[in-house]
């Protein structure tokens, strides 16, 4: 059974910080990227950030300079440090892993809610 489990969400005021965790056994060192997505109420799910096995990090423009993705292989965990949070960051946050060799089969966690109040 495949499991990706997100945690760390919560309610914060604008300007605050949260660190999300995605525990993803068998996904953090399998050659495929692990990514964070978010989905606000009534909107489509959107990509936020990815971390690749070659160390490359990528971010959606609106979170650049505020969010940081990282990985701890020993703990099979990917983190999303979110600073300077804004009300528009309010969403359910999901992590996604993939399986080799094609990295085209996607596996999702159940999500963790982030609410930012003004």
Image: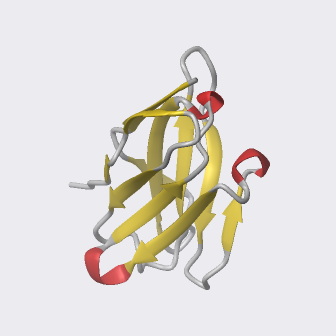
71 or 3: which is nearer to us?
Answer: 71
92 or 105: which is nearer to us?
Answer: 92
x then y, percent, for residue 11: 39, 31
x then y, percent, for residue 64: 73, 56
Horizontally, is 59 left or right of 51 in the view?
right
Dividing the picture into quarters, in which one does residue 57 lie? bottom right
Q: Which residue is depicted at the point 27% across and 55% down?
A: 2
Q: Which residue is depicted at the point 63% across and 49% down?
A: 48
Is 113 located above or below residue 104 in the figure? Answer: above
Q: Which residue is depicted at the point 32% across and 54% down?
A: 4
Horizontally, is 79 left or right of 88 in the view?
left
- The colour scheme is secondary structure
Given the current orientation, which residue lies at the most extreme left position? 1
Given the current orientation, which residue lies at the most extreme right position? 61
Is 15 located above or below residue 3 in the figure? Answer: above
Q: Which residue is depicted at the point 60% across and 28% down?
A: 87
x then y, percent, for residue 44: 63, 26
Horizontally, is 2 left or right of 90 in the view?
left
x then y, percent, for residue 88: 64, 29
């Amino acid at each position: 059974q495949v499991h990706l489990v997100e945690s760390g969400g919560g309610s914060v005021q604008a300007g605050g910080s949260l660190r999300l965790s995605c525990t993803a056994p068998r996904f953090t060192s399998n050659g495929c990227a692990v990514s964070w997505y978010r989905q606000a109420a009534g909107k489509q799910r959107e990509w936020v950030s990815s971390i690749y096995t070659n160390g490359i990090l990528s971010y959606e423009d609106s979170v650049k300079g505020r969010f940081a993705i990282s990985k701890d292989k020993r703990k099979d965990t990917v983190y999303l440090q979110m600073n300077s949070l804004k009300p528009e960051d309010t969403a359910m946050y999901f992590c996604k892993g993939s399986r080799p060799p094609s990295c085209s089969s996607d596996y999702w966690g159940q999500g963790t809610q982030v609410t930012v109040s003004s």
